[in-house]
Image (cartoon, grey):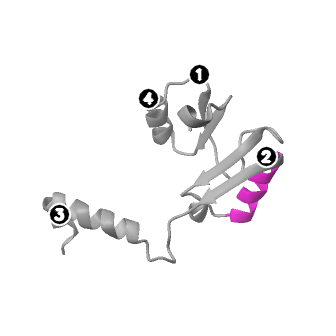
Amino acid sequence: MLAKADPIKVVGVEPSEGFLRLARAHIKDRQVTFCIGDAQSLPLRDHEADVVVSGLVLNFIPDKRRALAEMKRIIVPGGTLALYVWDYAGEMQLMRYFWNAASESFPEALLGLQA
């Protein structure tokens, strides 16, 4: 996103301090800030964002309506809201391919799963 869209500012909001540390360690760009927060109470001002993206998180939020209301609150009128989740309806074939490949590459990892 940074290389292709050249945004003025990117704000990452994450409830886990561990994930924030990892993100801060890997993404060093003056346009990017990371802050602790929750989708149900976003730490941004009203109409502060032109684009809001919620990736792979919506189904883990307890109060989805509240989270969507927060996203609507922080986005400018006419802004873009993008949400995506795993493809449950398509039986998550991507995940199946991933785990098949992982288990072929690292069969020893399966030992802990067998009872």
Tell me if residue 34 can be seen.
yes
Q: Residue shown at 54%/32% (left/top)?
A: 3
| Residue in the foreground of this view, choosing between 92 and 74 | 92
Q: Around disc 2, counting alpha carbons within 10 Å, would you say few (fewer than 14), some (14 to 19), or many (20 or more)?
A: many
Judged left or right of residue 113, residue 85 is: right
Q: Which residue is mark 4?
A: 25
Label 3 residue SS: helix
What segment carries the magenta color? 63-76
Q: Is residue 5 left or right of residue 50?
A: left
Alpha-carbon distance for marks 3 and 4? 31 Å
Callout 3 touching callout 1 (CB < 8 Å): no
Q: Secondary structure at mark 1?
A: loop
Label 3 vs 1, first from the N-terminus: 1
Tell me where residue 106 appears, x and y as whole percent.
17, 58
Where does label 2 land, which residue?
Answer: 75
User: From this viewpoint, is residue 40 visible?
Assistant: no
Magenta stretch: dominant SS?
A: helix
**Kind of residue at disc 3:** Glu
Distance from Cα at disc 1 to Cα at disc 4: 13 Å
| 69 in magenta | yes
Mark 1 to mark 2 CA distance (whole Å): 22 Å
**Residue 104: which numbered mark, if any?**
3
The reply to whether the C-beta atoms of the residues labelled 4 and 2 are less than 8 Å apart is no
Residue 79 falls inside the magenta stretch? no
Q: Which residue lies at the image location 43% right of the left edge and 35% below the top edge?
A: 22
